[in-house]
Amino acid sequence: MWTFQSFRRNVNVFELSVSQGHPDLLSMKVRCSYFWFYAKIKPTLFHNLYMNPDEAFLGDDCPVTYVSPDAHYEFFYYSNKCGIVTKTFQETLLLQTKIKYLSSNSGDMAEMPVSCVVTKQAWISPF
């Protein structure tokens, strides 16, 4: 059974962290490989609008997979799920999707594009 911990140990991944305003207040962390896409977000990703876990989605319909003890929401999915689009450029893969907020109390909605890059060197895991 693959877990994110074994994924971290066995695969070279590209990591991107996004902050809005202050560098110590990271709003999003993204990691990916040829097979996996991982995003960790703050519930206040959209300009301090608080999202409940059931209101946050990766792509159009992939729900939060884990609420971490530090109150972040995590998404961990295969890279061919959740409407993740993979584009190939010579030695590089570009994985593109979005984080979507859909309010359960109103019609409010927000989206943020999310991308991650995998180099060909990381396609092959060094076992």
Image (tube, grey):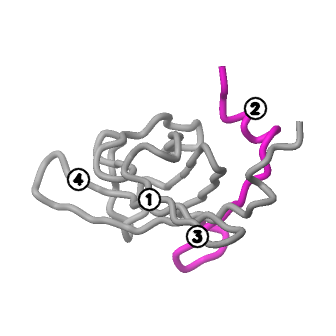
Residue 22 is situated, as x and y percent measured from the top left of the image, at 60, 77
As drawn, 105 above or below 110: above
Q: Residue at x 66, y 69 (%)?
A: 24
Q: Of residues 73 and 12, which is closer to you in this image?
A: 12
Q: Which residue is mark 1?
A: 85
Q: Could you tell me how far apart the alpha carbons at marks 4 and 2 are, in whole angstroms? A: 32 Å
Residue 93 is situated, as x and y percent measured from the top left of the image, at 62, 63
Give, as a single range, the part of the protein colored magenta. Answer: 1-26
Label 3 or label 1, whichever comes before in sequence order: 3
Along the horizontal axis of the image, is 27 left or right of 125? left
Tag 3 and tag 1, C-beta contact below 8 Å: no
Label 2 or label 1, whichever comes before in sequence order: 2
Task: Classify the position of the N terminus by image quarter.
Answer: top right
Tag 4 and tag 3, C-beta contact below 8 Å: no
Q: Which residue is mark 3?
A: 18
Q: Could you tell me how far apart the alpha carbons at marks 4 and 3 are, in whole angstroms? A: 21 Å
- Residue 6: mark: 2
Between marks 4 and 2 in the image, the one whose residue lies nearer the viewer: 2
Q: Tell me the amino acid under the disc marked 3.
A: Val
Q: Residue at x 61, y 72 (%)?
A: 89
Q: Could you tell me how far apart the alpha carbons at marks 1 and 4 are, in whole angstroms? A: 21 Å
Q: Which residue is mark 4?
A: 102
- Quarter location, residue 94: bottom right
